[in-house]
Amino acid sequence: ENASLVEIHTEEQLEFLQMELYILEDHEGRQNWWAGATDLGREGRWIWMDTLTTFPEFMWGSTEPNGGTGANCLYLYSGANYLGYDVACTDTYFPICQKFIE
């Protein structure tokens, strides 16, 4: 309740999340994960869905984004250090959710 897909705004946040995902990987195996960015509505302009802030370039895997109009959602790819890759929003991955506590 009152949660959204994770947003990563700093390199430190990315490093922390990568560390946590590698711990999960050791126990559960490799998985790919949904994060909360999209370019739906304006092709090539990636934003975080919850805050509508600009998606940071440091998040992309090499050669990304490259999916064109058919790949409008972001997942963290286990084969590339959990960096961002664009993919069709209908694909199936595990979500990483965040919840702000007031």
Image (cartoon, helix red, strand yellow):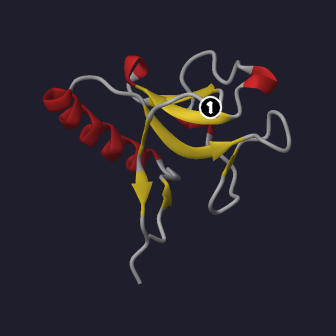
> Left or right: 68 with respect to 21?
right
> Left or right: 15 with respect to 57?
left
Q: Is residue 21 above or below residue 81?
A: below
Tag 1's secondary structure? loop
Residue drawn at 41 percent across, 47 percent down: 96
Residue at mark 1: 90
Place residue 82 in its image quadrant: top left
Which residue appears farthest toward the bottom when viewing the image? 102
Place residue 70 in its image quadrant: top right
Q: Nearer the viewer, residue 32 or 47?
A: 32
Q: Is residue 50 above or below residue 67?
A: below
Q: Nearer the viewer, residue 98 or 65?
A: 98
Q: Position of residue 64 (x, y in %)?
A: 64, 21
> Left or right: 95 with respect to 71?
left
Residue drawn at 70 percent across, 26 percent down: 71
Q: Is residue 39 above or below residue 12?
A: above
Q: Position of residue 91 (x, y in %)?
A: 56, 28
The amino acid at mark 1 is Thr
Residue drawn at 44 percent across, 70 percent down: 1
Residue drawn at 68 percent across, 57 percent down: 53
Label 1 Cα neighbours within 10 Å, binned few <14 / some 14-19 / many ≥20: few
Q: Position of residue 12 (x, y in %)?
A: 39, 49
Q: Is residue 72 above or below residue 65?
A: below
Position of the C terminus, as image quadrant, is bottom left
